[in-house]
Amino acid sequence: MRADLLVLLRSRVATVLSILLPLVIIVVTTFGKAETRLGGSAEIIGLALTIGLITSCLLGYSLTLAHDREVGVLQGLRVSPAPTWTIMTRRLTVQVAANLVGSLVVIIVGAILHHLTIGPLQYVLMLATAVLGAAVFLALGQALIALVRTTGAINAIGRILFIILLLAGILGGSGVLGDTMQSIADWTPVGALMILFSDAASATAWSGQDTNALLACRGYVVVFTFIGIRWFRWETH
C-alpha cells in the first residue's frame, strides 16, 4: 500500500490534473451566465466531479498500469510472495482513496464559489457517488488495459473515449441533439453520474431517473470488471 501510494504521489501530472481540471471548471463557471446555461450550481459541481474521475481513473490509472506492465513491473510483482489479487486490489484501493480526497476538495470549493449550501448528508451522498463513479471508470480503464496491450494505443484510445463520453453525456444530456439522444445520454456513464451528483448536491428526492442511473452505473461496473479480469495479461506478450 505504501509503495503504491508513493507511485501515485510521484505521478504529479495525473494527480494534479485530476484535481486542477475540475477546479478550473468550478472557477470558470462563476463568471457571466455560465452557471444558468449549464443548469445551475449542482449540475456544474457534478460535471466537475465527473471530469475529475474520468481524468484520474480512465486516463491516469490505465496509463500507469499499462506502463508498469510494459516495463515488466507487473511481471516482477507476480512472482513475488504476494497473491496476485492483492497487487491489483492495493492499486485500486489507493486510487479510490485519492479520488475521494480530490472529490471532497472539489465539493468544498464548488459549494463556496457557487454559494451552494451542502449539508452533512449531501456530502455523504456525493462522496458515495464519487466512489461509484471511480468504480465505473476504473473498471472501464481495466477493460481497456485488458483488451489493448501497448501503452501508446491505450493512451490514444483513452483520450478518444474521454471525448466521446463527455460529448455523449454533456451535449446529449442537454437536449441539444434531440430527445432521443437525451434519453440515451442518461444511460451513459457520464450522464448517469451527473444525474446522481446533481440530485445529491441539490437534495432532490429520489426518483425513477436516479434508480435508472444507479442501475446503469452498476451494470457498467459488472461488465467492464468482467472484461478487465477475463482478458487481463500481466505482460505484453
Image (cartoon, helix red, strand yellow):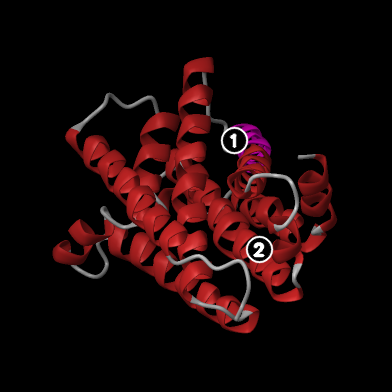
Residue corresponding to mark 2: 65
* Percent of width and height locating residue 25: 60, 55
- Examine the structure image and report whether residue 108 is included in the region drawn in magenta: yes
Image side of residue 101 versus residue 206, left or right: right
Give whichever of 118, 71 is nearer the camera. 71
Q: Residue furthest top?
A: 120
- Examine the structure image and report whether residue 217 is included in the region drawn in magenta: no
Give whichever of 151, 111 is nearer the camera. 151
The three-letter code of the residue at mark 1 reads Ile
- Earlier along the polypeptide chain: callout 2 or callout 1? 2
Give whichever of 153, 170 is nearer the camera. 153
Residue 134 can be seen in this image: yes
Q: Main secondary structure of the magenta part?
A: helix
Residue, x 51% and y 60% (percent of image)? 142
Report the span colored magenta. Answer: 99-112
Residue corresponding to mark 1: 107
